[in-house]
Image: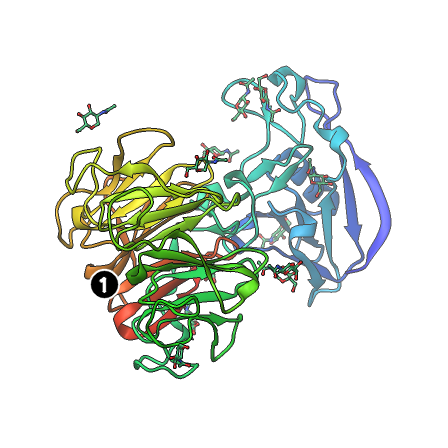
Amino acid sequence: MIYVPITFILFFYYYSHSQAYQSIISLSVSGNEFQPANIIELIGTFNVSLSIQCLSLCNQNPQCRTIDYESISYRCRLYEGQLSTGESRTSSSTTSIVAGIRYDDSNLYSSYNQTCDQCQQNHYLVCGTNGTCQCPNNTYWNGSICLNQIYNGSTCTTDNMCRSDMSITCSPFKQCSCGLKWNETSILVAGTGTAGSGLNQLHLPEYIYLDDNNTLYISDTFNYRIMKYLNGASAGIQIVGNGTVGSLSTQLHNPSAVYSDMYNNIYVDDTFNYRVQYFVNSSRNASTIAGGLGSGSALNKIGLSYGMFVDKYSNLYLSDEQNNRVVKWNSTAMHGVVIAGGNGAGSASNQLNGPMGIYIDGNNDLFIADANNNRIQKWLQNTSNGTTVAGGHGSGIGAEQLNFASAVKVDSQGNIYIADRSNSRVQLWTKNAVQGITILGNASQLRSPFDIILDEKTGAIYVSDRSAHKVVKFLFSTQC
Ligand SMILES: *[C@@H]1O[C@H](CO)[C@@H](O)[C@H](O)[C@H]1NC(C)=O
Ligand SMILES: *[C@@H]1O[C@H](CO)[C@@H](O)[C@H](O)[C@H]1NC(C)=O
Ligand SMILES: *[C@@H]1O[C@H](CO)[C@@H](O)[C@H](O)[C@H]1NC(C)=O
Ligand SMILES: *[C@@H]1O[C@H](CO)[C@@H](O)[C@H](O)[C@H]1NC(C)=O
Ligand SMILES: *[C@@H]1O[C@H](CO)[C@@H](O)[C@H](O)[C@H]1NC(C)=O
Ligand SMILES: *[C@@H]1O[C@H](CO)[C@@H](O)[C@H](O)[C@H]1NC(C)=O
Ligand SMILES: *[C@@H]1O[C@H](CO)[C@@H](O)[C@H](O)[C@H]1NC(C)=O
Ligand SMILES: *[C@@H]1O[C@H](CO)[C@@H](O)[C@H](O)[C@H]1NC(C)=O
Ligand SMILES: *[C@@H]1O[C@H](CO)[C@@H](O)[C@H](O)[C@H]1NC(C)=O
Ligand SMILES: *[C@@H]1O[C@H](CO)[C@@H](O)[C@H](O)[C@H]1NC(C)=O
Ligand SMILES: *[C@@H]1O[C@H](CO)[C@@H](O)[C@H](O)[C@H]1NC(C)=O
Ligand SMILES: *[C@@H]1O[C@H](CO)[C@@H](O)[C@H](O)[C@H]1NC(C)=O
């Protein structure tokens, strides 16, 4: 696009006012027309005999940011989109021009959020319902100017950046989208679908962990090992567990959960050894950092446990399924502290029944897949009772029900994602919802989704499909 450096100020006077209604225009050379980011940005087509009249029409309409004018047919088109959000491209008509109002000067917005008397006849701001000067429709305040709202698929940080009139919002994954939807075509990440112990195979994989580099760690439970898959790899690396069941420091017995910190120190919930193993720098020899004293309910012991979370202070949280409790072990602890349940199997608010996967959000709230109660419990820090945030209506396939949920994750907006294992589906309960929606397990064929990982950078969901002996991935969809 070639612009002649003509910038001129267009004055437009209203009959009863002496104030100028002005804006600054950039004009293209002849032979160009405007291609907006989306066709809905066309405000209207008018028939006027001079380009200046077309500009005047735009100038009077706070919604208008760009025009193109064709002087033979007198066609004047007004667009919402700012020149920089669309494209000025070569027209079949040599007499067509494009002109855009300039917006890059924050001085034009000095009356923003002031009382409406400050922005009468102002091209840049409109009088809002509360009597203050606000951004025109389909634009948003970015802190200094009003910018055009953007469409599905564009990067955002707040809802008001996205086209609110089209019900597009900013997803937790920082993309404008029409709700939370995933493409149900699965992408194979690990395993072949057949049980085996080759480096490209898995045998009843349970929990998984994804680090910041998109390296995936898989608890390859019935191969008694942990596999590491670099992003895009077709086979894994056997990092810990020598592959033979046992209780030596190099061995694991049906490991369930795995975590890797930023130094590649690996934590493994070594379920049938009643212990948590720590492999410093991914060495093959572990030290036991919790349990290891056989099954039992004393605080220095761990029963069969499924579900583990490690926070940034290296505090270890374990879902002790057998003891119906969640315990916390700090990095120097010789015994755990019960932080949820521990009052026997049951469904009272201070009880759990067979807790599986756990998750701790940024507020330190604990979410528990309370599997045998078919519910997700939320426990605030230092409280003795939980509240049900999903399920709790018995075992079943209804939208308000769950069936042996084995994992829970929560995104930055408080939406809850559940591996609804025995229903072969992944459920989403938006914040404060009274029922869930199935986001995976409709078109996609899942057998027993044991664990899910939400890649918050892109919205991709990884699913460990235990009885299908594989890990698959589903991409977030910004389609409307
Ligand atoms: C535009 O206006 C001119 C002059 O009034 C007229 O001749 C022409 O037919 C109009 N064009 C359209 C498309 O209405
Ligand atoms: C607008 O003014 C109100 C009331 O003074 C204030 O609370 C609000 O933060 C202001 N908004 C912006 C974006 O400056
Ligand atoms: C007026 O409403 C807008 C939203 O439309 C809001 O951002 C602003 O803070 C309100 N201003 C005042 C003074 O209440
Ligand atoms: C702006 O949007 C509101 C709400 O959709 C609508 O009522 C109003 O008419 C629009 N204003 C203009 C100038 O289009
Ligand atoms: C708003 O957007 C303009 C144009 O992109 C930019 O120059 C300005 O720094 C932005 N303001 C803020 C507060 O980000
Ligand atoms: C869904 O994903 C598949 C495979 O990645 C792709 O071929 C297809 O085009 C996607 N569908 C949509 C609607 O994005
Ligand atoms: C794992 O280590 C044990 C003990 O040294 C050994 O008996 C076993 O053969 C090893 N397994 C493999 C697959 O190397
Ligand atoms: C990710 O990769 C970078 C560069 O290789 C490395 O410095 C960083 O420690 C890695 N992060 C994790 C979590 O492994
Ligand atoms: C782990 O690796 C780091 C960096 O490579 C090194 O500084 C540290 O000494 C290692 N720790 C052990 C226990 O080997
Ligand atoms: C760690 O846990 C132990 C109980 O095992 C407790 O005595 C100790 O005070 C805790 N340390 C910290 C820093 O919380
Ligand atoms: C916690 O649950 C128990 C058992 O239902 C109940 O007796 C107790 O009142 C509850 N405490 C609170 C603070 O809700
Ligand atoms: C936005 O939604 C429309 C309508 O479904 C679709 O055609 C388009 O591909 C979507 N854009 C992106 C980037 O997802």
Q: Position of residue 318 (x, y in %)?
A: 35, 48
Query: Looking at the image, which residue is at 70% across and 65% down?
Result: 93
Residue 82 seen in the current view = yes
Q: Disc 1 residue type?
A: Ser
Within-10-Å neighbours for mark 1: few <14, some 14–19, many 20+: many
The residue tagged 1 is: 424
Front residue of 414/31: it is: 414
Quarter-of-image position of residue 86? bottom right
Quarter-of-image position of residue 353? top left
Query: Looking at the image, which residue is at 33% across and 71% down?
Result: 246
Ligand 11: give its quadrant: top left
Query: Looking at the image, which residue is at 65% across and 51% down?
Result: 85
Say whether residue 49 is left or right of residue 363: right
Q: Is residue 424 above or below residue 125?
A: below
Query: Looking at the image, which residue is at 75% across and 25% down?
Result: 20
Q: Quadrant of the N terminus?
A: bottom right
Q: Is residue 227 above or below residue 365?
A: below
Residue 50 seen in the current view = no
Say whether residue 64 is left or right of residue 233: right
Q: Position of residue 198 (x, y in %)?
A: 40, 84
Q: Position of residue 301 (x, y in %)?
A: 31, 48
Front residue of 334/105: it is: 334
Front residue of 360/67: it is: 360
